């Protein structure tokens, strides 16, 4: 594919404001790119305006999955941007815009690779399935839906195009987002003894849960320590009233040494204990994800590393990630290997003036083709 067309596909995607919603616009654009080709296109609706997209090419042979999410995070305060976040500005060898790094460059490079393979005019010895998901940034629920509905069941391997700077990320931490709500009784602040302050049990919970999580001090040899952050606190209606409701949220990044199930039980035991002491607390979770077990020993990881090093003359290490990806959902679909490999370095992901280097993106377009051909050869 000509450089100009490959760049246009990425810049067009960036110009679509899919910040935490409206992913169907991305699905529409990608669907149009594949019209006229002998491929299977399926729209899998999560909610109005939020369509996952599944595109399968090839008729036989090993099936390689390409995974990319259609959503991006919010642009935040626009005055912090040097370039408009949804206009895709090319400047000094970089493309600026929301999602350039995380991860429309990876998604676009996978799409370009598929189109180039289809345009090659040669019979393909294998298949590729693109899994373009909604809601990755807010809970991986698009990937969860696709996994649940069987779209990953027959994969022989999966590449997630998240930023990796051409290293092969073979493992990452899990995540538990939780919310604790406290109920009290509202009265005038001059007679607090007649009410029940909803904030105070949360203060106790925050102190106790941090002490509890700090005791999980064993370090995974690759992923390091479990981490915990109280990230939001809110309560009360005005300064001269005893608050009758309050809530806080916390974020835990888990490792295989402390399973998500273990952490759930510990959090809920603490809630029960505090409620016995007079609190009225409840806890809920928002799209928790398990860690990705190490893929370092898989044929796919070694194959991808070999292609990056030998075909593109780039260094390529096996690395670990602290953030969760759609991998946490797809590992529940089968025993196939999963790696994370993308063209961006990820250093500006979720930040103002997010960018990807033009040359890195174009290399990514070629890399995914090369890996697909090697994969078909090795898995035949």
Image (cartoon, helix red, strand yellow):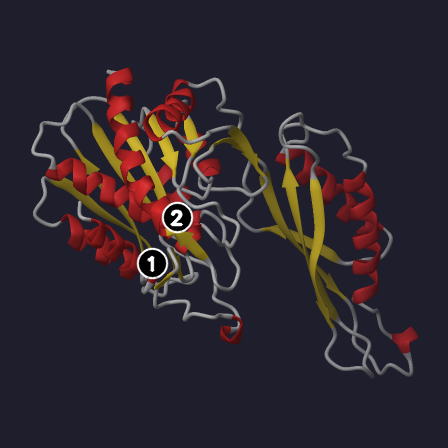
Is the C-beta separation of discs 1 and 2 under 8 Å? yes
Q: Is residue 120 above or below residue 97?
A: above
At 37% from the left and 37% from the top, the residue drawn is 147
Please state which of the two labelled residues, at mark 1 or mark 2, is closer to the viewer. 1
Q: In this view, does 302 lie above or below 196?
A: above
- The percent coordinates of residue 138 (x first, y second) are 49, 54
Q: Is residue 241 visible?
A: yes
Secondary structure under the numbered disc 2 in the rendered image: helix
Image mark for residue 359: none
- The percent coordinates of residue 246 (x first, y second) are 72, 66
* Front-most of residues 83 and 40: 83
User: Could you give the CA–CA distance between mark 1 and mark 2, rounded to whole angstroms?
Assistant: 10 Å
Compared across the picture, whether 249 is left or right of 165 comes to right
**Residue under pointer 2:** 142
Q: Can residue 336 be seen in this view?
A: no
At 63% from the left and 28% from the top, the residue drawn is 222
At 19% from the left and 25% from the top, the residue drawn is 126
- The percent coordinates of residue 26 (x first, y second) are 29, 57
- The percent coordinates of residue 293 (x first, y second) are 53, 27
Image mark for residue 23: 1
């Amino acid at each position: 594919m000509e450089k100009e067309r490959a760049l246009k596909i990425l810049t067009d995607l960036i110009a679509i404001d899919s910040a935490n919603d409206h992913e169907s616009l991305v699905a529409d654009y990608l669907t149009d790119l594949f019209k006229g080709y002998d491929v299977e296109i399926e729209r899998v609706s999560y909610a109005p305006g939020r369509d996952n997209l599944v595109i399968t090419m090839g008729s036989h042979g090993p099936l390689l999955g390409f995974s990319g999410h259609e959503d991006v995070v919010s642009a935040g305060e626009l005055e912090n941007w040097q370039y408009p976040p949804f206009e895709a500005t090319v400047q000094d060898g970089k493309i600026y815009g929301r999602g350039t790094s995380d991860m429309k460059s990876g998604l676009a490079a996978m799409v370009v690779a598929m189109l180039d393979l289809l345009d090659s005019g040669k019979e393909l010895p294998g298949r590729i399935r693109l899994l373009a998901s909604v809601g990755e940034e807010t809970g991986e629920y698009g990937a969860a839906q696709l996994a649940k509905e069987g779209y990953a069941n027959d994969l022989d391997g999966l590449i997630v195009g998240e930023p990796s700077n051409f290293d092969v990320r073979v493992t990452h931490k899990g995540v538990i987002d939780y919310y604790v709500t406290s109920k009290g009784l509202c009265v005038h602040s001059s007679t607090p003894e007649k009410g029940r302050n909803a904030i105070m049990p949360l203060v106790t919970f925050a102190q106790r849960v941090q002490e509890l999580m700090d005791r999980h001090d064993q370090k995974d040899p690759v992923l390091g320590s479990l981490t915990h952050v109280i990230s939001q606190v809110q309560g009360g209606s005005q300064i001269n009233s005893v608050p009758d409701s309050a809530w806080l949220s916390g974020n835990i990044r888990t490792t295989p040494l402390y399973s998500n199930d273990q952490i759930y039980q510990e959090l809920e035991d603490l809630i029960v204990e505090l409620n016995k002491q007079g609190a009225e607390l409840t806890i809920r979770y928002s799209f928790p994800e398990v860690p990705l077990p190490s893929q370092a020993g898989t044929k796919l990881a070694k194959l991808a590393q070999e292609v990056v090093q030998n075909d593109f003359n780039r260094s390529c290490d096996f690395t670990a990630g602290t953030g969760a990806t759609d991998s946490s959902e797809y590992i529940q679909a089968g025993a196939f290997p999963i790696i994370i490999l993308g063209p961006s370095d990820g250093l500006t992901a979720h930040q103002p003036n997010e960018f990807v280097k033009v040359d890195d993106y174009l290399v990514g377009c070629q890399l995914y083709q090369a890996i697909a051909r090697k994969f078909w050869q090795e898995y035949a």
